Image: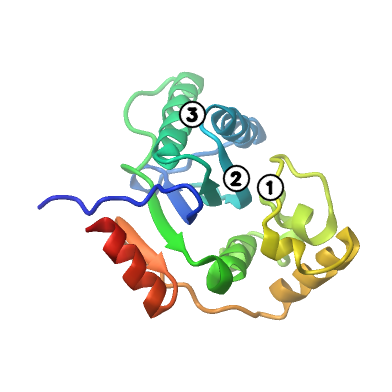
Amino acid sequence: MPRAPRLHDAGLLHHVISRGNDRQPLFKTSADFQKYIDLLSQARRQYPVKIYNYVLMDNHVHLLIEPQKEGNLSKFMEYVTKEYAKYFNKTYDRMGHVFQGRFKSFVVQHERYFFSCSRYIDLHPVKEKLVLHPHQYQWSGHGALAAGKPSPLTLDVHSLYGNLGATTHERQIAYRGLVTASMGEDLDLLDKRVCVLGDKEFKKKMKEQRT
């Protein structure tokens, strides 16, 4: 059965999930987390994408990104996964697959689902009972977005986030409110190669682009 084509068009927002093979750990030490962060930074210089939020869990990764050029999403993720797999296998003297196949991408309607996705990413370590509050988790973008803390990965500023307030401090307070007040819609992250997070009109538009 032929694969459904991916949507990589510049300007489309994507919620990307990449998992360890057979759900095995991707990161065992702080150095592993930092290596993946470094590769994200290297990859986006070579294949420009905007990264609005992220979280690195023990055995999977969530990214909220927007490719700046047609086809950059696949190139960006391929670079990161291949280079990290080489690092991981060499570091732990092992062979074989590190990641579980290709990444999954969910095309996101900016206006309706941007904050829902960002909040989902922030709260994932809480959901997995790693921390009690998202600001306690080091390997995510929450600290930067909600409190202006230095982030291991420099984030791009989405216009919707920028519209939360007139100053950086106002935007951080408003964003914290969006996260802690349990706002946003539940995300239907189905186990599909392509999924669209948006209203009926947006989904119809994305379906037409794939045909």
Element at badge 3? helix
| Residue 129 appears in the rendering | no
Nearer the viewer's eye, disc 3 or disc 2? 2
Q: Amino acid at mark 2?
A: Lys
User: Disc 1 versus disc 2: distance between alpha carbons?
Assistant: 6 Å
Give x and y (percent) for residue 205.
35, 68
For the C terminus, the image quarter is: bottom left
When the figure is inspected, residue 11 is found, relative to residue 89, above or below; the finding is: below
Q: Amino acid at mark 3?
A: Tyr
Query: Is tag 1's residue or tag 2's residue first in the polypeptide sequence?
Result: 2
Q: As drawn, is 166 to the left or to the right of 191?
A: right
Q: In the rendered structure, which disc, 3 or 2, sits on the residue that comes first in sequence?
A: 2
For the point 84% across and 53% down, which residue is it?
148
What secondary structure is marked by label 1?
Answer: loop
Asked whether the residues under the numbered discs 3 and 2 touch, taking CB atoms below 8 Å apart as contact, a structural biologist would say no
Whether the residues at callouts 1 and 2 have beta carbons within 8 Å, the answer is: yes
Report the disc number at residue 156: 1
Residue 124 percent location from the top left of the image = 58, 63
Disc 3: which residue = 84
Rendered image: mark on residue 50: 2
On screen, residue 3 versus residue 104, left or right, reads: left
Residue 146 lies, with reference to residue 18, above or below; the image says below
Residue kind at label 1, given as amino acid type: Asp
Q: CA distance from mark 3 to mark 2?
A: 20 Å
